[in-house]
Image: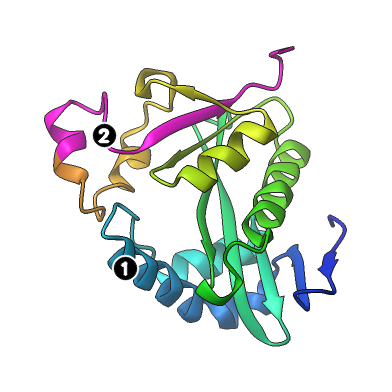
Amino acid sequence: MIDTIIDTTLKVIVIEAGPEHGKYAEQIVEMIETAARIRGTGIAKRDPRYIEKKMTENKAIIALNGSKPVGFCYIETWDHGKYVANSGLIVDPEFRQSGLAKMIKAKAFNLSRKRFPEAKIFGLTTSLPVMKINSELGYRPVTFSELPKEDAFWKGCSSCVNYDILQRTSQKMCLCTGMLYEPNNKK
């Protein structure tokens, strides 16, 4: 298991989620849906059972303030493990601009590297702060042609308000920016 990050200023722990954290799935989905409504931008909806499954598989990072979930991110593999997505990053509004998103993303990135060391790690986002965090981790912006080809991956975008753009462009572009980390890229 990856080391726990404890931020005493925020009174938050950032840990690899396990089956015992499944009880927070509904709250996490609610945080994601609320953020999507407020931002008015594309954030794909998640099912609580899916979030719980990611925790059970030890493929998620959760931030807790006592017994309250205040942040989350999970990993998903595509194209037979060739790609790993760090997805579903969410931070409770009270904890935004505190560095918590950066801690969560760093742990999700490290978990991805540990579990899938040869995989390319990617993300799709419309968030400038997430793009900045990704850049600091070594990601670079890419065209969608450099992302997974699996239909199941793109189906995950179907609940996004911008899905029609993705469909009209034959999955070549959208409002999201694709970002990719390549483990064998020396730059």
Going 74% across and 12% down the picture, which residue do you hit? 186
Q: Nearer the viewer, residue 124 or 129?
A: 129
- Residue 173 in picture, x, y percent from top left: 27, 27
Q: Is residue 26 left or right of residue 18?
A: left
Question: Quarter of the image containing the C terminus?
Answer: top right
- Name the amino acid type tagged 2: Cys
Q: Which of the marked residues, 2 or 1, is nearer the chain's N terminus?
A: 1
Specify few, some or many for label 2: CA neighbours under 10 Å numbering under 14, 14-19, or 20 or more. many
Residue denoted by label 1: 38
Position in image of residue 120 (x %, y %): 60, 26
Q: Is residue 79 visible?
A: no
Identify the element where label 2 is drawn.
loop
The tally of labels here is 2
- In the image, is residue 61 above or below residue 33? above
Q: Amino acid at mark 1?
A: Ile
Membership of 181 in magenta stretch: yes
Locate residue 70: give its quadrant: bottom right
Looking at the rendering, the stretch of residues picked out in magenta corresponds to 165-187
Secondary structure, magenta segment, majority class: loop
Q: Quadrant of the N terminus?
A: bottom right
Image check: 107 left or right of 174? right
Of all residues shown, which one is farthest toward the front?
97
Query: Residue at the location (43% across, 19% down)?
Result: 146
Residue at x 29%, y 44% (from the top left corner): 155
Within 10 angstroms of label 1, few (less than 14), some, or many (20 or more) residues? few
